[in-house]
Amino acid sequence: MRSYLARIGYSPSDLTPLNFIHISGTKGKGSTCAFTSSILTSHAHLLPPNKQKVGLYTSPHLRNVRERIRIDNEPISRDLFARYFWDVWDRLGRAAEERGTGEVGGVSRPMYFRFLTLMAFHVFVSEEVGVVVLEVGIGGEYDSTNVIEKPVCTGVSRLGIDHVAVLGETLEEISWHKAGIFKSGSAAFSVVQPAEAVGVLEGRAKEREVLGGEVRWVKEADVLPLDTELGLQGEFQRGNAALAVAVASEALRVVTGGEVDYARSHLGNGRLPELVRKGLRETVWAGRCQVLEDAELREERLVWCLDGAHTVDSLEAAGRWFVEREQKLSSEQGGDGGKKRIRILLFNQQTRDATALLKALRLAITTSPAAPTHPFFTHVIFTTNVTRRTGYSADLVSNATPTSDVHNLTVQRALDHEWGVLDSGEARATRWVCASIEEAVQRIRCIVTEDVSPQKLQGVVLCTGSLHLVGGVLEVLDESGGEGK
């Protein structure tokens, strides 16, 4: 990455003025980045005159690749994306021609994620962004984003088991990689972690000589008053929001030269400045505990609850969020309204251990204190992540899955069988396997519109298991009508 960076005209030190906040973790790092960016944007007028633009680089995207590179929380325009894409492409091409056979690994241009990371750096420098929230791709130590040398601070969201083929099979091994973003002289923050991770993070903090010599542990109760309103649903988002408040506050202190120092004046005493509250309240992060009303069906007959959870921990959290939401609605309706709703699970996971993830989701739902005694889902649908019957949308093409598995619905049929084994009660859910997201959406709409009961039951969908699935659903709903709520 350092070599590629040099080929487009930069050294790592050229990136330092961008004032990076570097975020790693297993679950919640994207939401943490979104909260952080929103907080900083609400403070833009207090930042130095040449540092009032806030950059955000995250992955993956849901619907459009431009979502990965944002300025002031908005994806860069098509024109800007095209301009900077070809600028970086051409610079790398010219550098390869000049070097002849000296390309990195024999390749003149890096792979997808590394190329977009280079492009994001180029965008942020060229557009004179003053502070950047940067999410790692995988891990941290060897992640392509870790080319930056002096972030203003770093943060680690909740750690868990993920990407074991790359990061290791134990939480200690994974924690070592995630803490690889720690840098000398920069404050290192973390949410409260499992015991196996704590010692590793502390050891890495000392090894890297972070500011203060140790990890700054962020406790939700110490940072967020109970009345704090968050733009993202789900009780688990409070931990992500607390970490965001901590890292954003440190960034504001550094960038303003101490003129804005919430750690000294507010944090820890039960108060949050209004601008911080505003940032948390106005945070928008599509596909994470997102609720949409299906505008194609009148009278609010169908509601979509979307969460791109794709690890055991995150699926457990998504399941609890959905059950608690249903329980709250049932209470508001004056009793057990659950039996008067059509509940549909739409699930996809194509590249990981899909069966294990499905089991984790079902266990979280059935063991939740808010779970009803009667069967929870009336219908279950397993789909591929192919967007439409005619194929993928341009920005949603997936090359990580064997084509034959997608075509033969191999994973979906295995999931369908597994659910049949798990759901062995008398009132079993009706199950379908669909070859595309478009087909699944149409099937769900038919389930609701063909309801012949006198009450005309409302349908609610939990769509989860994959960000690719959620992105595809948003794409299909946007074409036919979906309204955010």
Image (cartoon, rainbow, N blue to C red):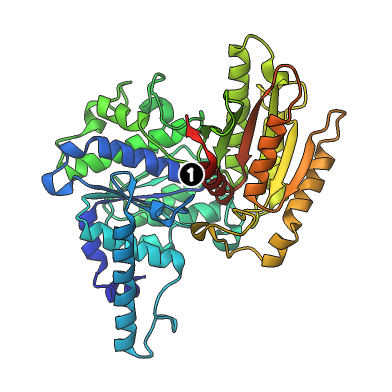
- Dividing the picture into quadrants, the one containing residue 260 is top left
- In the displayed structure, 135 sits above or below 420; it is below
Rendering coords of residue 116 (x, y %)? 39, 63
Rendering coords of residue 314 (x, y %)? 57, 41
Element at badge 1? Answer: helix
- Given residues 152 and 336, the one toward you in this image is 336
Left or right side of 338 for 231: left
Q: Residue at x 24, y 61 (%)?
A: 15
Residue picked out by circle 1 = 198
Q: Residue at x 58, y 65 (%)?
A: 399
Left or right side of 124 for 58: right
Most distant residue in the left direction: 49
Most distant residue in the bottom direction: 100
Amino acid type of the residue that numbered disc 1 sits on in the rendered structure: Val
Rendering coords of residue 454 (x, y %)? 74, 17
Most distant residue in the top direction: 334
The answer to whether residue 423 is visible is yes
- In the displayed structure, 347 sits above or below 143; it is above
Tally of marks: 1
Rendering coords of residue 225 (x, y %)? 38, 21
- In the displayed structure, 34 sits above or below 161; it is above
The answer to whether residue 361 is visible is no
Q: Residue at x 61, y 26 (%)?
A: 301
Residue neighbourhood size for the residue with mark 1, other residues' Cα within 10 Å, grouped as few (<14), some (14–19), many (≥20) = some
Q: Residue at x 34, y 84 (%)?
A: 96
- In the displayed structure, 104 sits above or below 172; it is below
- Point out the image quarter for the N terminus: bottom left
